[in-house]
Image (cartoon, rainbow, N blue to C red):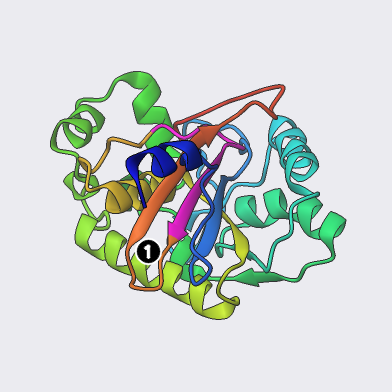
């Protein structure tokens, strides 16, 4: 083939498409949850705060469903905490898909600052919270989950998601802020807290390849939201 023939043929740019043997996992952060109040712990599930969605959070859940209802998903996954389940409910109703609960998708365990206390300490500018940010380790908080434990269970959870759906499909997981941050850091090899700012109701996308590698496709899309909130809590 001559150089003239090659030049005439040309090679156009094309929109990215996930490989046919991969699975795209759409990550939705739960809607805003009810306010933390000093001296009052949230209801607890397995040692972790389990607040319901606020009215703003419920509206964000409806906005997520409106944005995603036309997509073709092979499954809907949530954590064992009700704010993810309540956020997923409108999309599940719109698509008719069954919701699968994966406990390992739950939020980071914050030890002594569980039950809403962490959110309060952030607002107060507590030095312990500042030290967490400086070291980029949650287990600076007494009793909190270590980064190694957290990343390990999230890798396992994403493995469960991918194993549960057919290759070449897209699925959606309703998860938590620190979960999205850690998954994005694992996919990109970034600093641990580089992606720790996903808004409530935001949409991100992770492609899991057949060889086990991950590709971050998008992060913190919020154009569908009338009332963005977050990232703390």
Count of number-bearing discs: 1
Image location (x, y in percent) of residue 115? 46, 47
Observer able to see residue 110: no
Instruction: Choose top left, top right, bottom left or bottom right for residue 123.
Output: top left
Callout 1 crowding tier (Cα within 10 Å): few <14, some 14–19, many ≥20: many
- Of 134 and 173, nearer the camera is 173
Observer able to see residue 224: yes
Image location (x, y in percent) of residue 3? 33, 41
Residue corresponding to mark 1:
154
- Looking at the rendered structure, the secondary structure element under dot 1 is helix
Image location (x, y in percent) of residue 113? 34, 44
Q: Residue at x 37, y 73 (%)?
A: 156
Q: Does the stretch in magenta take in 62?
A: no
Q: Which residues are magenta?
A: 197-207
- Of 62 and 218, nearer the camera is 218
Q: Is residue 189 left or right of residue 96?
A: left
Q: Is residue 119 left or right of residue 134?
A: right
Q: Is residue 32 left or right of residue 231?
A: right
- Of 17 and 203, nearer the camera is 17
| Vertical arrangement, residue 160 with respect to residue 107, above or below | below
Q: Residue at x 70, y 30 (%)?
A: 224
Instruction: Choose top left, top right, bottom left or bottom right for residue 95.
Output: bottom right
| Vertical arrangement, residue 125 with respect to residue 110, above or below | above
| Vertical arrangement, residue 126 with respect to residue 175, above or below | above
Image location (x, y in percent) of residue 139? 20, 50
Q: Residue at x 60, y 76 (%)?
A: 165
Instruction: Choose top left, top right, bottom left or bottom right for residue 171.
Output: bottom right
Q: Residue at x 62, y 50 (%)?
A: 83
């Amino acid at each position: 083939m001559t150089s003239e023939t090659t030049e005439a043929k040309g090679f156009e740019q094309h929109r990215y498409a996930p490989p046919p043997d991969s699975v795209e996992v759409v990550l939705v952060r739960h809607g805003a949850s009810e306010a933390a109040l000093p001296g009052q712990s949230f209801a607890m599930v397995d040692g972790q705060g389990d607040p319901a969605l606020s009215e703003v959070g419920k509206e964000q859940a409806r906005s997520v469903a409106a944005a995603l209802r036309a997509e073709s998903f092979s499954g809907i996954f949530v954590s064992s905490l009700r704010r993810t389940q309540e956020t997923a409910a409108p999309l599940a109703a719109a698509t008719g898909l069954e919701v699968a609960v994966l406990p390992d998708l739950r939020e980071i365990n914050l030890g002594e600052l569980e039950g809403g206390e962490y959110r309060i300490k952030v607002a107060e500018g507590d030095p312990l919270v500042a030290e967490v940010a400086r070291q980029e380790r949650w287990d600076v908080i007494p009793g909190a989950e270590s980064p190694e434990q957290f990343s390990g269970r999230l890798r396992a959870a994403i493995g469960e998601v991918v194993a549960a759906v057919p290759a070449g499909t897209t699925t959606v997981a309703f998860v938590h802020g620190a979960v999205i941050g850690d998954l994005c850091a694992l996919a990109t090899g970034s600093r641990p807290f580089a992606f720790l700012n996903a808004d409530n109701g935001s949409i991100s996308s992770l492609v899991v390849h057949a060889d086990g590698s991950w590709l971050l496709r998008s992060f913190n899309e919020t154009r569908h939201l009338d009332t963005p909130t977050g990232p703390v809590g």
